[in-house]
Amino acid sequence: EMEWLFEAAPQSGYELIYVDDGCPKESGKLATERIKSKGIPHSKVLYLQDGIDQKEPNFDDIKDTKDSQKGGAVEYGMWMRAKESHPGQEHIIVFTDADLAANLSQTGLLCHNLTSSPSRMSCVGSRYDEGGIFCNEKGAMGVTKNFELLAFRDFLKRLLLPALGKGRDTQCGFKAFKASVVKKVIPSVTDRKFSFDMQLLMLVALQCGGEAAMGSEAVVYVDSLAESNFYQQAPGVDPMLESYKSYFNMMGRMLALHDTFKDKQEVPAANQPVIDFVRGLTLETFSKMMATMPRMQGKPDWGRVFTLPELQSWKSGVVLNAANYSNVTDPVSGEPLALDLTDAAALDRVYAAADRLLQTYPTVDALQAVEAALLERQRELPTMIHLAVKLAKSKALMAVCPPVFVTMITAMYNEKNRMCSKDEHPNGENFLVNKSREMEWLFEAAPASSWEIVYVDDGCPQGSGKLAEERIKSNGIPNSRVDFLQRAIDEKDPTFADIKDTKDSQKGGAIEFGMWEAAKGDHGDKEHIVIFTDADLAANLSQTGLLVFNLTSSPSRMSCVGSRYDEGGIFC
């Protein structure tokens, strides 16, 4: 392969270095004998054991050849040859596997890529770039059949290791480096295992010029697994499960590299929730996620950005298809797209839908799967079902929260009409009754927790506070009471000394006074959480479990915002 290629470059030279990685079958000795007996030109064998015996300084972490799994041998060979001098010639070091999967006559592609740009320091032979072809027993397949695994690994590379640039194939055993960069990065290498080449590429990117230093060249790769040290498969073992295991291990290595280099590459803060999710996967949940992920047709969906809701849904193993999608959507199929907050019967149907969802999909993961599927048809489906799944998820999360006491603060100004029922006024939302109902329904899942709603009159000229007190008493509305901003003024509360008249407040003063008064309460061992909301029913309080779970799941979390615009949020 090399002789044939170099016929085109008589001024250039080459050598083949085979490095024995501590082979128990004495591959190095056998290769030396064959090279000699057959007169194979330009070929030589090195031994990693020699590096150990001679205490080669850049490999002093290797105490035994068993400390290496391919990586140590390749790096030792690269390092030893990089020290050689070749005056008048650019010294390029290529590594490849012992099999014939990557035909070395393609080395010209990598050499041309490297020498065509002074800033280029490495070049990866790629099976998956445009023009690359992966071949197996079925012929020239283009890429492997594991489209979803490849697309997800590509996504992880972009998510965790953006310094590696746009190249799709970091794992092909056919990579070229300028010798000068080998001498620069090998002293920093610590990975001696099968994933060593990703660390090599990261070091090139971070120490030698960024993305401009990284080349990629499409090649033909003929799969060769018959004698593989990494893919030996026992009889009866599911090959798909073995693939999941291999990709899961690679994901772990990418996370480790991400942690190692996190201060040396720019990773957007928005990526962190997905990174945290990926870090929490086990082999079992990773396998379930990949098995549930919708099949990609024809080729991997290169460049796809996988969202957190869809990953969470696939992790749960729940797929809404034609067979079971109707279980969720049929009960609301006749509902209008909009939700009328004055319609008491419609609100009853929201809770009926939420209860059905909890019975059918009782876990948070399953509900997130349903939510992700519904979001794909967001504008086609009634608001009612989107709200129902969010309420169901909130209740499922509330059930696993530690005991809390929640104080809900609501400011009131000109709320005389909205506190009525629709029978009393066309704009009536009956919010005093409905807000209490929303909290009661949610806290059924958390019997060790408690709640209250405090309405703060902001100096309402219609007397909203007095009217609310009367309705709370006459309707027996539980856990609800009224306070007045005027009290802070009359009692000369120093915290609100700047407010001389209720007209000095426009909602903010009333909310802050209510929060301040609530925060003085003693609720024993329960975490006290103070929430504020508006008097209308726009934000259904049964979603409070989402906020409580967010706050209580991290000791450093001090506030949580209900968001209409984050991934999964819906404005109706």
Image: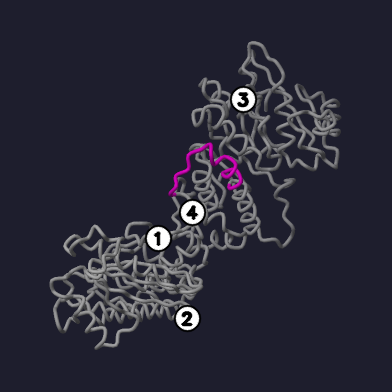
- Percent across and percent down for residue 358 are 44, 77
Q: Quadrant of residue 12?
A: top right
| Residue position marked by numbered label 4 in the rendering | 274
Q: Which of pointers 4 and 3 indicates the residue nearer the eye?
A: 4
Q: Earlier in the sequence, mark 1 or mark 4?
A: 4
For the question of whether residue 337 can be seen, the reply is no
The quadrant in which the N terminus is found is top right
Q: Secondary structure at mark 1?
A: loop
For the question of whether residue 364 can be seen, the reply is yes
Q: Which of pointers 4 and 2 indicates the residue nearer the eye?
A: 2
- Percent across and percent down for residue 22 are 82, 38
| Residue position marked by numbered label 2 in the rendering | 447
Per the model, the C-alpha gap separating discs 4 and 2 is 32 Å
Residue positioned 28% across, 79% down in the render: 434
Q: Is label 3 in contact with label 2 (beta carbons under 8 Å)? A: no
From the viewer's side, name the closer residue of 461 and 33.
461
Q: Which of pointers 3 and 1 indicates the residue nearer the eye?
A: 1
Q: Secondary structure at mark 3?
A: helix
From the viewer's side, name the closer residue of 10 and 509.
509
| Residue position marked by numbered label 3 in the rendering | 181
For the residue marked with disc 3, what is the amino acid?
Answer: Val
For the residue marked with disc 4, what is the amino acid?
Answer: Val
Q: Earlier in the sequence, mark 4 or mark 3?
A: 3
| Colour setup of the view | one colour
